[in-house]
Amino acid sequence: MTISQHPVFYATVMLLAGLGIPVMAALNGGLGTKLQSPMLAATILFGIGLVASLGLLIAIEGLSISLPKTPTSVISYLGGLFIVFYIFSITWIAPKFGVGNAVFFVLLGQIISVAIIDHFGLMGALHHPISLRRAAGLILMSIGVFLAVRRF
């Protein structure tokens, strides 16, 4: 098993991604306020993201990218709509509601969503049924996040 296949590596990368969400919310919320347009700020963020992801795609996979031979369901591409909704909403709401409050509700939504997705094994996710112990953990996480950012 290489380091990039180790669970600690996965956890570290996701921790860093999580650390970046409030930073991105604060930066893009500030940009939206300065530009007086949350949608323009979100569009700029996506433009920069497109350039960065294309650069990484070419650097990691090269220019000879081939499409998969098997058909892909249209539903598989809908994640893009969720990220547009997230970026626009956090850019618009965070400056008015506070980054902490906005991210709290994002985390609460993620806790609810992950419980449902894992419980039913939706969209190809690993099936992890909600046990009493897991439900208690999810409730404690929700309470902990609420207590950490209680500002409303």
Image (cartoon, rainbow, N blue to C red):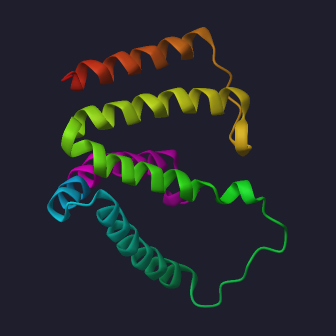
* The magenta segment: 1-26
The residue shown at (33%, 47%) is: 90
- Residue 141 screen position, x and y as percent: 40, 21
The residue shown at (39%, 53%) is: 87
Foreground pick, 133 / 108: 108
Above/below status of 110 relative to 45? above
Foreground pick, 40 / 150: 40
Foreground pick, 18 / 10: 18
- Residue 28 screen position, x and y as percent: 25, 58
* Left or right of 7 in this view: 31: left
- Residue 45 screen position, x and y as percent: 34, 66
User: Residue lying farthest left?
Assistant: 34
How many numbered callouts?
0
On-image quarter of the N terminus: bottom right
The residue shown at (83%, 67%) is: 71
The residue shown at (23%, 53%) is: 29
Above/below status of 6 relative to 100? below
Task: Check if residue 147 falls in the magenta segment.
Answer: no
Above/below status of 69 relative to 89? below
User: Residue lying farthest bottom?
Assistant: 63
Predominant SS along the magenta part: helix
* Left or right of 108 in this view: 117: right
Task: Check if residue 8 falls in the magenta segment.
Answer: yes
Residue 134 found in image quarter: top right
Residue 143 found in image quarter: top left
* Left or right of 73 in this view: 145: left
* Left or right of 42 in this view: 118: right
User: Residue lying farthest right?
Assistant: 70
On-image quarter of the C terminus: top left
